[in-house]
Image: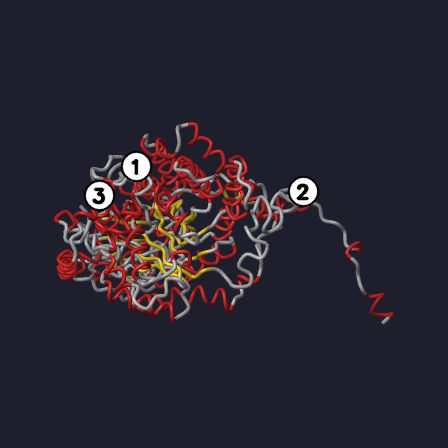
Amino acid sequence: MSEHHEATLTLDEFERVTYESWREAVERDLKGAPFEKKLVTHTYEGVDVLPLYTSREWSGAGDSSGFPGFAPFTRGVEPMDHVKLGWDIRQEFVESDPARLNEAILTDLAGGVTSAHLRFDVAGRNGLDGDDASAAALAGRDGAMLYSVDDLDRALNGVHLEMIGVSLEAGGAAAAAAALLTALAERRGLDLAQVRAHFNADPLAVMSRDGGMPGGHERGFELLGELATWTRKHLPKSRSVRVGTAPYHHAGATAAQDLGFSMATAVAYLRVMTSAGLSIDEAAQQLVFNFGVGCNFFLAGAKLRAARRLWDRVLEASGSTERESRMFMHVKPSRRVFTRRDPWVNLLRDTACVFAASVGGAQVVTSYPLDLAIGEPNEFSRRIARNTQLILQEESHLHRVMDPGGGSWFIESMTDELAERGWSIFQDIERRGGMAEALRSGWVHEQIDSVFKARLKNVSTRKDAITGVSEFPNMMEEPVRREEPKFAELRERAGERLAERHRAADTDELIGRVGGARSGATMNAAVKAAAGGASLGELFGAMVKDRKAEEVAPISPHPYAAPFEALRDASDLAAEGGLRPRVFLANMGPVAAHTARTGFSRNFFEAGGFEVISSEPMKSGHEAMEAFKASGANIAVICSSDELYQTMVWETAPQLREAGARTVILAGYPGELEQGYREAGVGRFIYMRCDVLQVLTELLQEEGVLA
């Protein structure tokens, strides 16, 4: 024991390494290269991510993040949060046909899902029934055809509404959809006080996504206030209003912008609800904050922590006193990171997003199927999506640790910076008259676009890589296909259901009561009308009276992979006619000389859908010329080392031109030799950080594949 004790070293016996001494050692290793350029990463939010974090960046003095369950709630709104029971696993359902939708819901509930999110189709989200003449191109698209209580009853057959939470995504028709669900609960004889529903009224999100709100956003605000006060009274376990930043996030908004937009939206809704008669705490308890997160889980987790802190600051300034008013958060993966090509990689993206949501402290988490960007998911992809959450919860035990990022110098400092930047954006919006005015003026669009331009540049140069699309594309992949629903048949059946319902009940008087209801009585009249047979479209029409939407510029989504996937689509279309563009790789010299640039070039051109024909190692320009003639390509790429280029480009490039190469490309950065290489016949150069998207686009145009 004594010998062991004598051999034990204490921390004091090691020489203390200071930050300054570490920095000096690093700068020596960099040999004059700038530390900030080589080792500091700059995010789109303007946050500098350092290679090393110490107490210099976040001392912990006073611990601004506090304890879980205590102000400022950065670390969670409850002391134990979901440590015991885990988070709510909420699956999104988009199946067009109510019967098929019901099968999907029951299967997923049996498989571990704990709540259901029903996405209404485009017609329903615009307050239209499927048989409406103006809904011909909208019915069944991107969601479920739920136009009546009967449709909802069919979709939720076997689902116990007093036990299973149901969330509705009905866009501008949120109040009408809420009336349908409530009428269904009453039909089943349920105690409304036990029903747990989220109605997700969010007129600003509708306005930003669609370019306007049917009936105008002011009427949308009025309905939001009525729905909130009615929900508070009749469905105390339900929430009526969503603060959704999805339109902004899908378009490319940064984490800081997300925070600022969410606070501005929430404050706008608080004003509406308090004007309708609710207290600050009552109004806050009607809100569900809905955030999208990407694959950078450190940034995403810090964003969610910062969001709680900012909301606590808003509530404190508003006079809130109840813990129950603190942020209730539903987090989903961002659609902007999902790809159509090589969708199996989406499994990893989804896992990263769900991980971020869970460690960031979300109460409700949705996991997306891998085929999200392709079409309606099937049972397999939904099963994988829900099992992703179950593995992270039940096998990885992520929920067993309360705020795992708490105390990390890196996470805490990033949380602080995002909170500060998000608050600044929120204040800027308030100075401009609020979120609605910021949308109408185009300011929100400008803020997102300014950042997205920088992001698009990094995607184009592959600084921001998209695995399976811009990097490591799989030209031999079997496309994942999803059969498109037979929309015409589904619409016809929906029309028959609506007609049958109309024949069974005279709803004109009931609908008239909805339209004529005094302020505050609209929802009561709407529930009665829904129970009497009124459809979603009829309810919405009575609520808004004038369906004309105000016109603002919509905020368009920008999936990161879209520009490269468009090139692949064009190449595939050309291939169907037997004209897939080809590229010939002239691999000059020994394998060691060309292999790195051969791999780079193959990756480069397959990202644009080119068929790549790679030669055996060649020693002369004559060999390259003969091999190129046999390739059937119009484009030749010389691949070798910088050293060999200086002797063989002068021979090889002219002979490739003579063999019929319309374009000769050199793989590598030419430096001061560029002009000489061009005189020899090289027309282009490809290298790390060149604009891959631009080069591929121009080459496909030259090939006649793109207009």
For the question of whether residue 439 can be seen, the reply is yes
Mark 2, secondary structure of its residue: loop
Mark 3–mark 1 distance (CA, rounded to whole Å): 16 Å
Measuring from the top left, give residue 77's x and y in whole percent.
Answer: 54, 50
Say what amino acid the circle numbered 1 marks: His
The tag earlier along the polypeptide, 1 or 2, is 2
User: Looking at the picture, how far across and down is residue 632, in whole percent?
Assistant: 19, 59
Residue at the outermost right position: 2
Kindly identify the amino acid type of the residue bearing the numbered disc 2: Gly
Question: For residue 542, which numbered disc appears in the image?
Answer: 3
Viewed as shown, does residue 23 lie left or right of 411? right
In the image: residue 12, left or right of residue 130: right
Whole-percent x, y for residue 526 in the image: 27, 48
Name the residue tied to disc 1.
217
Choose mark 3 or mark 2, whichever is in front. 3
Q: Which of the 4 quarters of the picture holds residue 587? A: bottom left
Q: Nearer the viewer, residue 533 or 374?
A: 533
The answer to whether mark 1 and mark 2 are in CB contact below 8 A is no
